[in-house]
């Protein structure tokens, strides 16, 4: 598995080796992310033009593209400079004009000689009741033929459709015969063409339907991309699983103590997840599991049960949160339960200094602290454990695949459980976390009240503030989230400070607190603490409160300019209320008039509190990259596969990739060898490296 197989060399040669592509064109193609013939194969037509011939322009719907055989009549050169050059032509029923606004007369005479027959194809329109065709796209002699349906490729400045078509044809001619990597039963069941056939069909559509993601050729090519991607993740998972872990088997003694003091029964989904995690920890390989749950589905309890399993087995556990506020909150929420179980739980943050910090570190190293709660940053410094069995990482999308691997290297045998409160559509969960096993919390624990959601135009701000004043007088608490300003924390902070001042003027000085990203951590914590303790009634904030903050008495959430937020973010923010017994409301303030997408977003939120449904809708509205924020997600860029419309293919690809590896771990069977080809073809170098390591 040392290098690229020889039969693929022509597809990875320089672009200049293709007909009609010189160094200048090759440089321009780079703007379309095309660097080798292989990239042209997966740059599929984005639309098409119907070039089926008609007998006369009178038979065509104008304005529109017409392909028509004609006899060339007289040439009418312009009387003065700057006027168009006209040529009369005659089809089976009528006479019309070809018009050129540029080009030399000799050129036009050579191309369209009077008295000759030609086939013209181009956009025709009616001008003063007479049809005319300015600058035909194609002029052919009678023996030549055009494809009845002409593919249209994405272009960039300096690249013409002709150059692109010629380069694509050159790339297609280099596709070697390749062995089939797709499971033969799946191929037969779906009726998919072979790889080479699929490329030919996708690049030579016969009608508009052939451009759709549902066409057989495009399905097949999308599947190839998804299969290579899932094979890479499955290889990472197999490599991960082949690493020795520790067998961590708990007795259940501590978990029973916690269940005895809980005021409610865990939900079925919580119980199922606890069991899945305990089974994983008891195996001799390393656990790498994602716990995915909607806002308020009770992930923290599941995490505590997993941490207690580690302690029951004589080990330690760590819970890492993305911010200090959250780490502190986890520690405060879990401490009473840890006390009930007789377990020592400590918080370690960047604020622990000097002796206090050293005392905690030495207690950890001696095994006197059973469960440590801290931020991601703390864990990366020299914190040594006596016997770390489990790391729980909260809020995944701030913690990508690279950090997961880093953590794996630091404590090679430690089991890893990642928790995310962002419900991600299944297709994306498989794309991003296909190397992990999945536990899903899809039920809400009892005691959470539904949140009433309403939309209000910003013009009614005074009414909203009056309502807020009345609610505060009744002892209720509220969040007020300020609008997102184009990616600038400084401007966000300024807008939050202005809103803070205006609300303080309306509600009284002591009633309002403020939290934003530009504040010193100590000030942020103090403002949060005052709100949690009920000393302030309204907390004005930027989206720092989106994740995890828990104030059961807060029952009103006002989101200013909700139309500037994404669906998932709005759902997360709304999840901050409805945590206590009080009836809760969420007011989405928008600036009229609303665009279609913003209106759809606010409507979905009013209709549903199901985070998984909301995330599916979000995917349909915004596309995959935006749902997870491609910048930090490391979401792969697929050239053919469309995650919104072909989500089901991703699940099939995962099942197929895992099954192939289970049967043929080093891909040495004939189908395994073919699968290696698709990994090279899709440039999945990481997978190929894993195979070498394995």
Image (tube, rainbow, N blue to C red):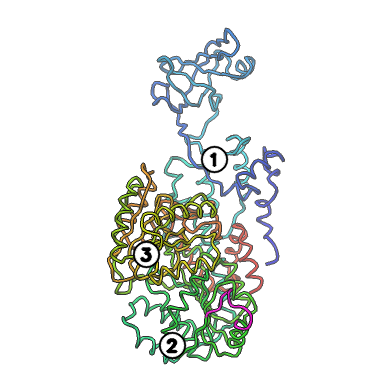
Q: Which residue is mark 3?
A: 537
Residue 649 placement, left or right of 164: left
> Quadrant location of residue 260?
bottom left
Residue occupied by mark 1: 153
Segment tinted magenta in the rendering = 347-356
Horizontal side of 554 relative to 545 (left or right) equals left
353 drawn magenta:
yes
Q: Which mark, residue 491?
A: none
Is residue 268 left or right of 374 when viewed as pictured?
Answer: left
Q: Quadrant of residue 617?
A: bottom left
Label 1 vs label 3, nearer the camera: 3
Q: Which residue is mark 2?
A: 339
Q: Quadrant of residue 678?
A: bottom right
State left or right for residue 681 relative to residue 647. right
Residue closer to the observer: 550 or 657: 550
**Mark toward the start of the polypeptide (1 vs 2):** 1
Q: Residue at x 50, y 26 (%)?
A: 122
Where does the image place residue 206, in percent across and percent down from the top left? 46, 40
């Amino acid at each position: 598995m040392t290098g690229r197989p020889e039969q693929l060399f022509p597809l990875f040669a320089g672009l200049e080796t293709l007909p009609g592509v010189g160094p200048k064109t090759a440089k321009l193609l780079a703007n379309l992310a095309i660097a080798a013939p292989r990239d042209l194969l997966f740059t599929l037509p984005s639309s098409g033009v119907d070039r089926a011939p008609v007998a006369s322009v009178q038979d065509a719907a104008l304005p529109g593209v017409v392909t028509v055989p004609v006899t060339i009549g007289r040439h009418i050169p312009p009387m003065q400079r700057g006027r168009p050059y006209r040529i009369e032509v005659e089809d089976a029923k009528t006479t019309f004009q070809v018009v050129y606004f540029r080009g030399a007369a000799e050129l036009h005479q050579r191309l369209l000689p009077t008295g000759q027959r030609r086939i013209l194809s181009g956009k025709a329109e009616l001008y003063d009741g007479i049809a005319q065709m300015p600058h035909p796209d194609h002029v052919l002699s009678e023996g030549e033929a055009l494809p009845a349906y002409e593919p249209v490729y994405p272009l960039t400045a300096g690249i013409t459709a002709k150059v692109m078509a010629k380069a694509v044809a050159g790339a297609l001619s280099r596709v070697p015969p390749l062995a089939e990597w797709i499971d033969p039963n799946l191929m037969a069941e779906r009726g998919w063409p072979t790889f080479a056939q699929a490329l030919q069909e996708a690049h030579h559509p016969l009608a508009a339907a052939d451009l759709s993601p549902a066409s057989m050729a495009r399905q097949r090519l999308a599947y190839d991309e998804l299969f290579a991607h899932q094979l890479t993740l499955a290889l990472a998972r197999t490599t991960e699983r082949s690493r020795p872990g520790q067998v961590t088997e708990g007795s259940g003694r501590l978990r029973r103590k916690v269940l005895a003091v809980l005021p409610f029964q865990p939900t079925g989904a919580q119980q199922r997840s606890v069991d899945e995690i305990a089974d994983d920890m008891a195996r001799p390989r390393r656990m790498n599991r994602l716990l995915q749950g909607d806002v308020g589905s009770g992930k923290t309890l599941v995490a505590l049960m997993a941490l207690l399993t580690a302690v029951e087995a004589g080990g330690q556990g760590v819970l890492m949160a993305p911010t200090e506020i959250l780490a502190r909150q986890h520690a405060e929420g879990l401490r009473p339960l840890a006390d009930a179980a007789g377990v020592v739980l400590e918080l370690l943050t960047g604020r622990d200094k000097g002796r206090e910090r050293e005392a905690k570190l030495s207690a950890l190293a001696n095994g006197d602290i059973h469960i440590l709660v801290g931020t991601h940053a703390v864990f990366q410094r020299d914190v040594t454990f006596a016997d770390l069995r489990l790391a729980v990482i909260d809020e995944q999308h701030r913690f990508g695949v690279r950090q997961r691997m880093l953590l794996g290297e630091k404590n090679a045998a430690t089991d890893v459980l990642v928790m995310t409160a962002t419900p991600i559509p299944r297709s994306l969960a498989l794309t991003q976390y296909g190397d992990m096993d999945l536990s899903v919390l899809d039920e809400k624990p009892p005691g959470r009240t539904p949140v009433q959601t309403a939309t209000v135009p910003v013009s009614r701000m005074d009414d909203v503030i009056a309502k807020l004043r009345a609610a505060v007088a009744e002892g209720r608490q509220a969040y007020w989230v300020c609008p997102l300003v184009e990616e600038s924390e400084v401007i966000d902070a300024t807008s939050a400070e202005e809103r803070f001042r205006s609300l303080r003027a309306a509600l009284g000085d002591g009633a309002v607190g403020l939290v934003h990203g530009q504040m010193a951590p100590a000030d942020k914590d103090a403002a949060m603490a005052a709100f949690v303790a009920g000393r302030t009634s309204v907390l004005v904030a930027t989206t720092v409160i989106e994740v995890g903050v828990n104030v059961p008495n807060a029952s009103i959430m006002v989101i200013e300019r909700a139309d500037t937020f994404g669906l998932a973010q709005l759902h997360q923010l709304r999840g901050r209320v409805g945590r206590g017994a009080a009836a809760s409301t969420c007011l989405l303030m928008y600036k009229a008039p609303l665009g279609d997408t913003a209106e759809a977003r606010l409507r979905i939120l009013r209709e549903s509190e199901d985070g998984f449904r909301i995330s599916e809708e979000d995917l349909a509205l915004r596309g995959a990259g935006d749902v997870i924020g491609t910048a930090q997600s490391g979401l792969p860029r697929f050239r053919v596969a469309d995650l919104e419309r072909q989500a089901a293919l991703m699940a099939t690809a995962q099942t197929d990739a895992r099954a192939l590896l289970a049967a043929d771990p080093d891909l040495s069977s004939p189908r395994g060898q073919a699968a290696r080809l698709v990994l090279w073809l899709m440039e999945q170098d990481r997978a190929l490296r894993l195979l070498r390591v394995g």
